[in-house]
Image (cartoon, coloured by chain):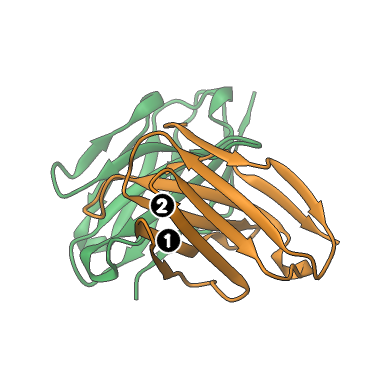
Amino acid sequence: AQSVTQLGSHVSVSEGALVLLRCNYSSSVPPYLFWYVQYPNQGLQLLLKYTSAATLVKGINGFEAEFKKSETSFHLTKPSAHMSDAAEYFCAVSDANTGNQFYFGTGTSLTVIP
Amino acid sequence: DAGITQSPRHKVTETGTPVTLRCHQTENHRYMYWYRQDPGHGLRLIHYSYGVKDTDKGEVSDGYSVSRSKTEDFLLTLESATSSQTSVYFCAISPDNGGSPLHFGNGTRLTVT
């Protein structure tokens, strides 16, 4: 069965500091991997996706993620945090074995300290 | 939000009453999904549809039913609402099941008293 683990339900960083949000997945076949962001009272917005092309994926708002098969990880990073990055972040996985159904992690709430 | 409208945005209902939530899309996407979001659980799939009148269960389908009579509309019904169904419900759409991302509506906050 597919699963996604996001380490750290709450992460705090100072404005201008590196953002690192961790995601590990389990999948028996090559996965599709996604990061979504959710602002208060809104739906989820796609930040970036990995679909077996380049292992380093660049997304919107300066975020990027690296697919590491050996570590079954897809961590999200941003070199310099902005106040506007404060939100909830979700990692998701899907693959052909699950009919491409999506499985989401439990989310990481990012706080940016001025 | 990729042409997705959920209605209502907020609803308060009493235990035992039926409730229907509506998802309407203007993207002509084949796949539509209903998720619920609860603290500590992330998003969990309730039901999904892969075409008109074609639906299937997700991981938390008990107590819910769905219908899709038109490409653009996907209805989620709680036949007899319970307090455990208090949640935020999200509709999502996708053009295919081959790695395309989901696009989400803004959600419906349902409170069952």
**Hey, what amino acid is under mark 1?**
Tyr
Nearer-the-camera pick, A33 or B102: B102
Tell me, yes or no, if residue B102 can be seen here: no
Against B59, is B45 above or below? above
Residue located 41% across and 63% down the image: A4
Q: Is residue A22 left or right of residue B97?
A: right
Q: Are marks 1 and 2 in contact (CB under 8 Å)?
A: yes
- Could you classify mark 1 by the number of other residues whose Cα lies within 10 Å: few (under 14), some (14-19), or many (20 or more)? many
To which residue does mark 2 refer? B32
Nearer-the-camera pick, B111 or A7: B111
Residue at the outermost left position: A53
**Hey, what amino acid is under mark 2?**
Met
Residue located 39% across and 59% down the image: B49
The answer for which chain carries disc 2 is B
User: In what element is the residue under mark 1?
Assistant: strand
- Tell which chain the image draws in green: A
- Same chain, labels 1 and 2: yes
Which numbered dot is residue A31? none
To which residue does mark 1 refer? B48
The answer for which chain carries disc 1 is B
- Tell which chain the image draws in orange: B
